[in-house]
Amino acid sequence: MHGARKEGLSRRHRFAVQGSFGPVLRSPQKVRGTLATVHVAQGRPGISRLGIALTRRLVPSSVQRNRVKRIARELFRRHPVKLAGLDVVISLREKLTAEGREKLGTDVRTLLDEALRKASAG
């Protein structure tokens, strides 16, 4: 597939160093769902960044952790929050089960919608 456009999330839309999203986690603006929490802070204008906080305790399998990250990045990439100039960190609230993995995409999409609404209002 030479010349095909890569559709992943570009580096400028990710936090450069793991753990550099501490200020976003400490931000008072957050939206809690059943499976995840979305933390939001004002970022640079026009560039939103995504951080994903997963621990081995909540998702023991590296394969599953990577799958969760792919799902979160894809939802962020296709969501209007990407254009809002916000820094977003998604963290899981509890251990992820097989049933939870099925619902995670819907939960995160809803949380991103609500986070964008809150950020626009305030």
Image (spheres, rainbow, N blue to C red):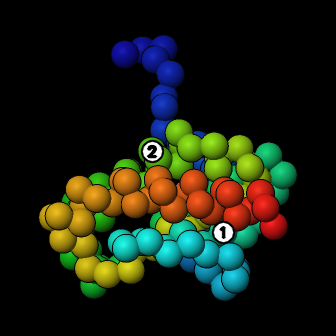
Residue 54 in sight here = no
- Relative to residue 117, is residue 20 depicted above or below? below
Q: Name the residue under label 2.
A: 74
Q: Is mark 1 on a helix, strand or loop?
A: strand
Q: Nearer the viewer, residue 37 or 9?
A: 37
Quick one: quadrant of the C terminus? bottom right
Q: Are marks 1 and 2 in contact (CB under 8 Å)?
A: no
What x and y, as percent, mark residue 26?
66, 85
Question: For the residue marked with disc 2, what is the amino acid?
Answer: Glu
Q: Name the residue under label 1.
A: 40
What x and y, as percent, mark residue 54?
39, 74
- Relative to residue 48, is residue 9 depicted above or below? above
Rounded to the nearest angstrom, the CA distance separating label 1 from label 2 is: 18 Å
Q: Which of 78 and 110 is in front in this view?
A: 110
Whether residue 45 sits left or right of residue 101 in the image: it is: right
Closer to the N terminus: mark 1 or mark 2? Answer: 1
Residue 91 in sight here = yes
| Image-quadrant location for residue 96 | bottom left
Q: Nearer the viewer, mark 1 or mark 2?
A: 1
